[in-house]
Amino acid sequence: MNDLCRELEWDSQFFGRRIARIESDRLDKHCLNLTLAWCKERGIECLYFLCSPNDDESVAIAEAADFHLVDLRSELNWRTEILQEPLSSFVRQYQESDLATLQQIASQAYTATRFSFDSRFSREQVADLYKEWVTVSCQNEKHKIFVAWNENDIAGFITCSSDTEEIGRIGLLGLSEEAKGKGFGRQLVQAAQRHFWATGMREVQVVTQGRNIAAQRLYQSCGFRTFKLGLWYHKWF
């Protein structure tokens, strides 16, 4: 069944429910029937489906099968180049003593994600998900984390990793409520861009939500362009 869908061990363990994901971004009725039968046999409680927005048949099949649209996934990329703007004095590299504050910011910053818009996941679970995400990233020696300062407080953070030797990835960008609208997001993105340029990356990719207009405008103002869209559906059994 691995060619149609797979059970997600991490998600299942974290949320305490058996969760699986459809592997393809398209559906036909035959594949759906096989998938639903497999889910029933395995006791799957929630099924994720990232659907191509260009295939109306898949959309119609998913909606007829009671899949719920929870997010528009927007993928953006930037072709690396030297930045002309000066390096911000309000951004520095992550220190271990920052972790508790970054966890607090992460627990409050992500209110536009697909998990936030699925009422079957509690607010506490969603907060814990992003706390765990930033914790794992900060503890990964292969990741680079930058932190922005607002007077004596941490204003936000950005996490950087690599998909390949040529493609970098921005994982999380989080700001405290007090820091929003003050330019710290742009400074953090530019710190990440400088890092990826310096480490020889050819391209940088980032994923955000279609409903998160502020994030899209921020990345676009830093030279990122949308290159792919997807429709996130969840089906509960």
Image (tube, rainbow, N blue to C red):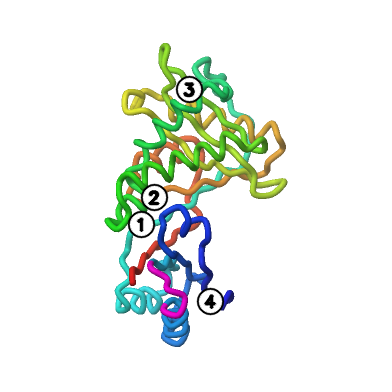
The spot of residue 66 in percent (x, y) is 30, 74
Pointer 1: what residue?
71
Pointer 4: what residue?
4
**Residue type at mark 2?**
Gln
The Cα atoms of the two marked residues, 4 and 3, are separated by: 43 Å
Q: Earlier in the sequence, mark 2 or mark 1?
A: 1
Q: Which mark is residue 209?
A: 2
Q: Residue at x 53, y 76 (%)?
A: 4
Give the crowd class for mark 1: few <14, some 14-19, many >=20 residues within 10 Å.
many
The Cα atoms of the two marked residues, 3 and 2, are separated by: 23 Å
**What stretch of residues is rendered in magenta?**
40-45
Circle 4 or circle 3, nearest the eye: 4
As rendered, which of 8 and 4 lies closer to the eye? 8
Q: Earlier in the sequence, mark 3 or mark 1?
A: 1
Answer yes or no: do the residues labelled 1 and 4 have beta carbons within 8 Å? no
Residue that sits furthest to the left in the current view: 119
Give the crowd class for mark 3: few <14, some 14-19, many >=20 residues within 10 Å.
many
Give the crowd class for mark 2: few <14, some 14-19, many >=20 residues within 10 Å.
some
Pointer 3: what residue?
148
The spot of residue 83 in percent (x, y) is 59, 28
Image height of 216 relative to 195, above or below:
below
**Residue type at mark 1?**
Asp
**Residue type at mark 3?**
Ala
Q: Earlier in the sequence, mark 4 or mark 2?
A: 4
Q: Quadrant of residue 92?
A: top right
Image height of 22 relative to 97, above or below:
below
Q: Circle 1 sits in a helix, a strand or a loop, which is it?
A: strand
Q: Earlier in the sequence, mark 4 or mark 3?
A: 4
**Residue type at mark 4?**
Leu
Q: Residue at x 51, y 67 (%)?
A: 7
The Cα atoms of the two marked residues, 4 and 2, are separated by: 25 Å
Q: How many marks?
A: 4
